[in-house]
Amino acid sequence: MQGRVLIVDDDDHLCRLLALKLKAMDFDTVFRTSGAAALTALESEEVDVVLTDLNMSGMGGLELCQRVASVRPDLPVVVLTAHGTFDSAVGALRAGAYDFAVKPPDMGALGMTLSRAVEHHRLREEVKRLRQVVAEGGQFAELLGSSPAMQRLFDLLGRVAQSESSVLIIGESGTGKEMVARALWSKGRRKDGPFIAVNCAAVPEQLLESELFGHAKGAFTDAKGARAGLFQQADGGTLFLDEIGDMPIHLQVKVLRALQERKVRPVGADAEVPVDLRLIAATNKDLESAISEGKFRQDLYFRLNVIQVDLPPLRARGADVLVLAQHFLRHFATRASKDVKGLSPEVAKALSGYSWPGNVRELQNCVERAVALTRNDHLVPDDLPERIRSFQPSHVVVASDDPSELVPMEEVERRYISRVMQAVGGNKTMAARILGLDRTTLYRKLERYGLAAEGA
């Protein structure tokens, strides 16, 4: 069904005739023979568009437009006028009409006008839904999403925001780990203190120690003055160590000591400096595997992982993809001063079906590109990157000569774990035995891949 139309005309015969013709075009219809009756119907009827005659006894079409605009500003009104004059059209549009059509109407043209009006209404409803999602996010409204995975995340963040305990955020690249860290800081006891962030993988190893702990004057060449490190800069607030799994192991010892003693020693300094902060760390690596390989200290892992927050990948968040896409579209359209109103159904389908290996960051970049390139008021498939337009979900392929059939190893693991969980009816002990994993690792992987419900 294309949409539901409320037809308003004081001629009962014309109402029935229009209803019959629109039904043949896959519209659902309801009709009323006066403006007053139409307003009453809108109190209980759910419709996508109002189609009204301009000249009616009693309340005319222009007044009806004005009344609908005041009580249902999201509901488009299409006005039928027998005159088709410029003045009639301008009057209808000024009264709040979405569009107008000449009476008697060309049904093909009218059908297209109503289809656009229905899509306009549904996009307005989507914007309202997005606002509701933001409102329902409660104290973490900066994190968008209404999927079960995000609701579980909101619940956990709400319980730990006021804590002083260290937090370890685990999630794939692009899932928004720093955004979660900032949310914890902004809603925590230290919100009036600084939020200091550093990506451990982005700072050269030889500079990272000085960056974290500071240095004394003359500690090394070009150290012409003392400099406070990030631990000191975060005093009274929160320090966020992103990609902690990439930190060199010799620095891990010093970070562990700083957390235990609440003191740091700047490079080249003789004395320690006390620090008071909350530490939040994040990684996209499997730290338990890194520990077994001797690449990460187990004692630091336990010190960091007092509270673990697992971020779901975008592919496990269902309809959140479209909520986020609409949010990014509005942001980038406003920034570029472009009148891009929403997503075409084909684009929505493509975005929903894609696997998003780059998660929210990839979606954001995709929408930014599409808004920049589009020449339409709605994004169309040609605005999307080829990898998204041509994406086809496939079964696990272990060996193939066709590169397009191959998927990342992580995706192979996710699909296989899902298949095993389904085969054993959600029995985690049996699944762990088959997969050769301990139960803790299996639990973590189920959460990471958004498969926890399969083991419920």
Image: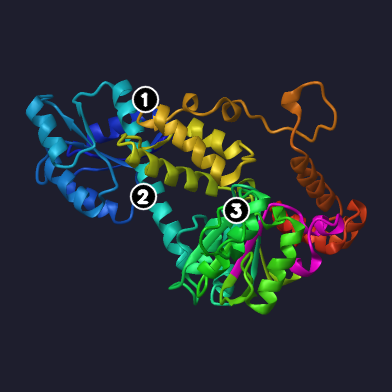
- Residue shown at the point (53%, 40%) measured from the top left: 363
Residue 417: mark: none
Disc 3 to disc 2, how far (Cα)? Answer: 73 Å
The three-letter amino acid code for the residue at tag 2 is: Glu
Q: In the depicted view, which residue is nearer to us: 302 or 208?
A: 208
Looking at the rendered image, the disc whose residue lies closer to the viewer, 1 or 3, is 3
**Residue 253 at least partly seen:** yes
Left or right relative to 114: residue 408: right
Placement of the C terminus among the 4 image quadrants: bottom right
- Residue shown at the point (48%, 43%) measured from the top left: 325
Left or right relative to 381: residue 337: left
* In the depicted structure, whether residue 294 falls above or below residue 113: below
Which residue is situated farthest in the left direction here? 87
Residue 293 drawn at (x, y percent): 86, 54
The three-letter amino acid code for the residue at tag 3 is: Thr
Residue 389 drawn at (x, y percent): 57, 27
Which of disc 3 and disc 1 is earlier in sequence? 3
Disc 2 to disc 1, how far (Cα)? Answer: 33 Å
- Residue shown at the point (38%, 43%) measured from the top left: 330
The magenta-colored residue range is 279-301
Q: Which residue is mark 2?
A: 46
- Residue shown at the point (45%, 28%) measured from the top left: 380
Which of disc 1 and disc 2 is earlier in sequence? 2
Q: Which residue is mark 3?
A: 221
Left or right relative to 131: residue 54: left
Disc 1 to disc 3, how far (Cα)? Answer: 55 Å
Q: In the depicted view, which residue is nearer to us: 96 or 390?
A: 390
Q: Which residue is mark 1?
A: 375
